[in-house]
Image (cartoon, rainbow, N blue to C red):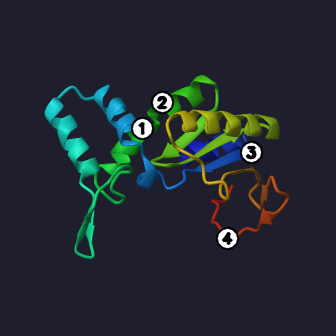
Amino acid sequence: MRKVWKEIDGGREWIVDGDLQDFFGSVDHEKLLTLVAQRVADSRVLRLIKAMLKAGSYGQGKLFPSECGTPQGGVASPLLSNILLTPFDQEMRRKGYQLTRFADDWVITCKSAAEARAALAAATRILERLGVRLIRRRRGLCIFSRDLIFWDTGSCEPPGKASFPAA
């Protein structure tokens, strides 16, 4: 958060807020395993990760296989999300955007509405190549001040709905 506050204080008051649609439930196993294999050479570890991804879930007396996704709440899921989204981080930074991400949640700070719209478009394209989609109802642009957040739609949220540190 310090990084984001520093960027806001530096004039990057336009925020692109991104949340990924059913990220942990929809991750493409093959894309993820390909990216993991670029970082992990041990075939035993790769087989273990694949088995974990394909293990499925048990409920109502039945085994439900997993064709996609990672176990939400699983100890390896944040690590796997970081591996899958590292190309997104790298490409956005290569394009000059100030991206801050934790697992599947991220923000990009921008100096103008035009830069924010361009960042959102670039993020959407890159994420779709990785097989990930943004949640349409949550993604958006806003301009930040310590008193209000003005969403690009024209509505705003008064302080109190979120706590912002004092200047």
Q: Tell me whether the residue at label 2 lies in contact with that at label 1, contact meaning CB atoms closer than 8 angstroms.
A: yes
In terms of depth relative to the viewer, which is nearer, 21 or 66?
Answer: 66
Identify the mark nearer the N-term, 3 or 1. Answer: 3
Judged from the image, the secondary structure of the residue bearing numbered disc 2 is: helix
Q: Residue at x 76, y 68 (%)?
A: 158
User: Where does residue 85 sit, x and y in percent of width and height?
Assistant: 46, 38
As shown in the figure, which amino acid type bears the numbered disc 4? Lys
Select label 4 or label 2 by which is in front: 2
Q: Point out the residue furthest to the top here.
A: 94
Residue annotated with mark 2: 87
Residue drawn at x 80%, y 63% as measured from the top left: 156
| Position in image of residue 130 (x %, y %) | 50, 36
* Position of 17 relative to 45 (above/below): below
Q: Earlier in the sequence, mark 4 or mark 2?
A: 2
Q: How many marks?
A: 4
N-terminal label among 1 and 4: 1
Tell me the CA gap for discs 4 and 3.
19 Å
* C-alpha distance separating marks 1 and 4: 32 Å
